[in-house]
Image (cartoon, grey):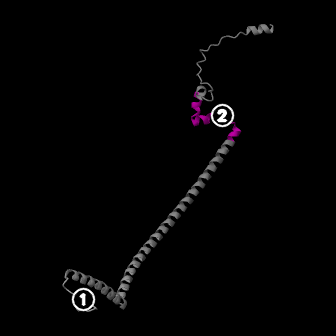
Amino acid sequence: MPPLEAKKKKVMKPRRTGSMGAKPVLAPKEGTSANPDHVLWPIASILENPSVAEKLLEGVIPPLDKEEVEKLDLDLAISTLFHGVELEGQVADIGAREQKAIKELKRMKEDRDATIQKLEEENTELKVKEVLTKKSIIEEYKSSDDFQEAMEQVASRYFGEGFDLCKKQVEHLYLELDLQDMQIDDELA
Protein backbone atom coordinates (compact mmCIF):
# COMPACT_ATOMS: atom_id res chain seq x y z
CA MET A 1 0.00 0.00 0.00
CA PRO A 2 1.27 3.30 -0.93
CA PRO A 3 1.66 5.79 1.87
CA LEU A 4 -1.15 7.89 0.59
CA GLU A 5 -3.63 5.08 0.77
CA ALA A 6 -2.54 4.20 4.28
CA LYS A 7 -3.25 7.71 5.36
CA LYS A 8 -6.64 7.60 3.74
CA LYS A 9 -7.56 4.41 5.53
CA LYS A 10 -6.90 6.02 8.88
CA VAL A 11 -10.04 7.98 8.89
CA MET A 12 -10.86 9.75 12.04
CA LYS A 13 -13.84 8.35 13.81
CA PRO A 14 -16.01 10.73 15.74
CA ARG A 15 -15.50 10.51 19.47
CA ARG A 16 -18.25 9.73 21.82
CA THR A 17 -18.32 12.68 24.22
CA GLY A 18 -21.24 11.40 26.23
CA SER A 19 -19.27 8.58 27.79
CA MET A 20 -16.40 10.79 28.92
CA GLY A 21 -18.54 12.89 31.22
CA ALA A 22 -19.05 16.64 31.29
CA LYS A 23 -16.01 18.82 31.86
CA PRO A 24 -16.36 21.58 34.39
CA VAL A 25 -16.51 25.06 32.99
CA LEU A 26 -13.47 27.06 34.04
CA ALA A 27 -13.28 30.80 34.22
CA PRO A 28 -10.87 32.51 31.85
CA LYS A 29 -7.23 32.42 33.03
CA GLU A 30 -8.15 29.81 35.58
CA GLY A 31 -6.47 26.50 35.01
CA THR A 32 -6.44 23.29 36.95
CA SER A 33 -3.75 24.56 39.33
CA ALA A 34 -6.02 27.43 40.33
CA ASN A 35 -8.91 25.07 40.98
CA PRO A 36 -7.56 21.66 42.05
CA ASP A 37 -11.02 20.50 43.16
CA HIS A 38 -12.12 20.21 39.50
CA VAL A 39 -9.31 17.83 38.70
CA LEU A 40 -8.13 16.23 41.95
CA TRP A 41 -11.07 16.40 44.30
CA PRO A 42 -11.15 12.72 45.27
CA ILE A 43 -7.37 12.49 45.64
CA ALA A 44 -7.08 15.85 47.40
CA SER A 45 -9.69 14.85 49.96
CA ILE A 46 -7.80 11.61 50.65
CA LEU A 47 -4.55 13.52 51.17
CA GLU A 48 -6.15 15.71 53.79
CA ASN A 49 -6.04 12.75 56.17
CA PRO A 50 -2.46 12.57 57.57
CA SER A 51 -2.45 8.82 58.19
CA VAL A 52 -3.59 8.06 54.61
CA ALA A 53 -1.01 10.47 53.20
CA GLU A 54 1.70 8.82 55.30
CA LYS A 55 0.72 5.34 54.07
CA LEU A 56 0.76 6.53 50.47
CA LEU A 57 4.18 8.09 50.88
CA GLU A 58 5.63 4.96 52.50
CA GLY A 59 5.43 3.21 49.15
CA VAL A 60 7.09 6.14 47.39
CA ILE A 61 10.22 6.37 49.59
CA PRO A 62 12.82 3.67 48.76
CA PRO A 63 14.01 1.40 51.63
CA LEU A 64 17.47 3.01 51.86
CA ASP A 65 15.92 6.43 52.18
CA LYS A 66 13.52 5.11 54.83
CA GLU A 67 16.47 4.41 57.13
CA GLU A 68 17.76 7.94 56.61
CA VAL A 69 14.29 9.36 57.17
CA GLU A 70 13.90 7.34 60.38
CA LYS A 71 17.35 8.51 61.52
CA LEU A 72 16.39 12.10 60.69
CA ASP A 73 13.13 11.61 62.56
CA LEU A 74 15.08 10.32 65.58
CA ASP A 75 17.56 13.21 65.33
CA LEU A 76 14.68 15.64 65.06
CA ALA A 77 12.96 14.07 68.07
CA ILE A 78 16.19 14.23 70.10
CA SER A 79 16.87 17.84 69.14
CA THR A 80 13.26 18.71 69.93
CA LEU A 81 13.61 17.01 73.32
CA PHE A 82 16.83 18.90 74.08
CA HIS A 83 15.24 22.11 72.88
CA GLY A 84 12.27 21.44 75.17
CA VAL A 85 14.58 20.72 78.11
CA GLU A 86 16.53 23.89 77.34
CA LEU A 87 13.29 25.89 77.22
CA GLU A 88 12.19 24.38 80.53
CA GLY A 89 15.54 25.44 82.02
CA GLN A 90 15.08 28.94 80.67
CA VAL A 91 11.54 29.08 82.05
CA ALA A 92 12.81 27.93 85.45
CA ASP A 93 15.60 30.53 85.31
CA ILE A 94 13.13 33.25 84.39
CA GLY A 95 10.83 32.11 87.20
CA ALA A 96 13.71 32.28 89.69
CA ARG A 97 14.65 35.76 88.48
CA GLU A 98 11.03 36.83 88.74
CA GLN A 99 10.79 35.57 92.33
CA LYS A 100 14.05 37.34 93.19
CA ALA A 101 12.77 40.57 91.62
CA ILE A 102 9.48 40.26 93.54
CA LYS A 103 11.35 39.80 96.82
CA GLU A 104 13.58 42.77 96.02
CA LEU A 105 10.54 44.94 95.20
CA LYS A 106 8.83 43.90 98.44
CA ARG A 107 11.97 44.75 100.42
CA MET A 108 12.27 48.12 98.67
CA LYS A 109 8.59 48.88 99.35
CA GLU A 110 8.99 47.99 103.03
CA ASP A 111 12.09 50.21 103.24
CA ARG A 112 10.22 53.05 101.55
CA ASP A 113 7.21 52.66 103.85
CA ALA A 114 9.48 52.63 106.92
CA THR A 115 11.30 55.74 105.69
CA ILE A 116 8.01 57.54 105.02
CA GLN A 117 6.72 56.67 108.49
CA LYS A 118 9.98 57.82 110.09
CA LEU A 119 9.88 61.12 108.17
CA GLU A 120 6.24 61.71 109.14
CA GLU A 121 7.10 61.16 112.81
CA GLU A 122 10.07 63.55 112.54
CA ASN A 123 7.86 66.12 110.79
CA THR A 124 5.26 65.92 113.57
CA GLU A 125 7.98 66.20 116.22
CA LEU A 126 9.50 69.24 114.49
CA LYS A 127 6.09 70.95 114.28
CA VAL A 128 5.57 70.43 118.02
CA LYS A 129 9.05 71.81 118.73
CA GLU A 130 8.36 74.81 116.48
CA VAL A 131 5.15 75.65 118.36
CA LEU A 132 6.89 75.30 121.74
CA THR A 133 9.83 77.42 120.57
CA LYS A 134 7.51 80.17 119.33
CA LYS A 135 5.66 80.18 122.66
CA SER A 136 8.87 80.36 124.66
CA ILE A 137 10.24 83.20 122.48
CA ILE A 138 6.99 85.16 122.89
CA GLU A 139 7.01 84.64 126.67
CA GLU A 140 10.66 85.65 126.87
CA TYR A 141 10.02 88.80 124.85
CA LYS A 142 6.97 89.71 126.95
CA SER A 143 9.05 89.49 130.11
CA SER A 144 11.80 91.71 128.69
CA ASP A 145 12.09 95.47 129.37
CA ASP A 146 11.99 96.24 125.65
CA PHE A 147 8.48 94.81 125.39
CA GLN A 148 7.29 96.80 128.42
CA GLU A 149 8.64 100.05 126.96
CA ALA A 150 7.14 99.33 123.55
CA MET A 151 3.73 98.62 125.09
CA GLU A 152 3.82 101.84 127.13
CA GLN A 153 4.68 103.86 124.03
CA VAL A 154 1.93 102.29 122.00
CA ALA A 155 -0.61 102.74 124.80
CA SER A 156 0.30 106.37 125.42
CA ARG A 157 0.19 107.21 121.73
CA TYR A 158 -3.15 105.41 121.30
CA PHE A 159 -4.75 106.86 124.35
CA GLY A 160 -3.15 110.26 123.76
CA GLU A 161 -4.59 110.51 120.27
CA GLY A 162 -7.88 109.22 121.57
CA PHE A 163 -7.87 111.85 124.36
CA ASP A 164 -7.20 114.67 121.89
CA LEU A 165 -10.09 113.48 119.75
CA CYS A 166 -12.31 113.32 122.81
CA LYS A 167 -11.35 116.88 123.78
CA LYS A 168 -12.26 118.15 120.32
CA GLN A 169 -15.64 116.45 120.45
CA VAL A 170 -16.35 117.92 123.89
CA GLU A 171 -15.39 121.43 122.69
CA HIS A 172 -17.65 121.06 119.70
CA LEU A 173 -20.62 119.80 121.69
CA TYR A 174 -20.17 122.11 124.66
CA LEU A 175 -19.13 125.51 123.39
CA GLU A 176 -19.46 127.16 126.79
CA LEU A 177 -16.74 124.98 128.29
CA ASP A 178 -13.23 126.28 128.06
CA LEU A 179 -10.95 123.27 128.12
CA GLN A 180 -7.85 125.45 127.89
CA ASP A 181 -8.58 126.96 131.31
CA MET A 182 -8.97 123.59 132.88
CA GLN A 183 -5.90 122.42 134.62
CA ILE A 184 -5.25 118.99 133.03
CA ASP A 185 -2.03 117.21 133.82
CA ASP A 186 0.19 117.26 130.70
CA GLU A 187 1.35 113.73 131.30
CA LEU A 188 -2.23 112.54 131.06
CA ALA A 189 -3.01 114.68 128.08
Residue 148: which quarter of the image? bottom left
Q: Is residue 88 above or below residue 29?
A: below
Residue 154 magenta:
no
Asked if residue 4 lies left or right of residue 46, the reply is right
Q: Amino acid at mark 1?
A: Gln
Asked if 43 appears above or below 123 in the picture, the reply is above
Q: Is residue 58 magenta?
A: yes
Is disc 2 surrounded by few (<14), some (14 to 19) or many (20+) residues within 10 Å?
few
- Label 2: which residue? 59
Amino acid bearing label 2: Gly
Q: Quadrant of residue 49?
A: top right
Query: Pointer 1: what residue?
Result: 180
Q: CA distance from mark 2 to mark 1?
A: 146 Å
Q: Are marks 2 and 1 in contact (CB under 8 Å)?
A: no
Residue farthest to the front? 176
Q: Residue at x 59, y 31 (%)?
A: 44
Q: Which residues are magenta?
A: 41-67
Of helix, strand and loop, which one carries label 2? helix
Instruction: Identify the image quadrant of the N terminus.
Output: top right
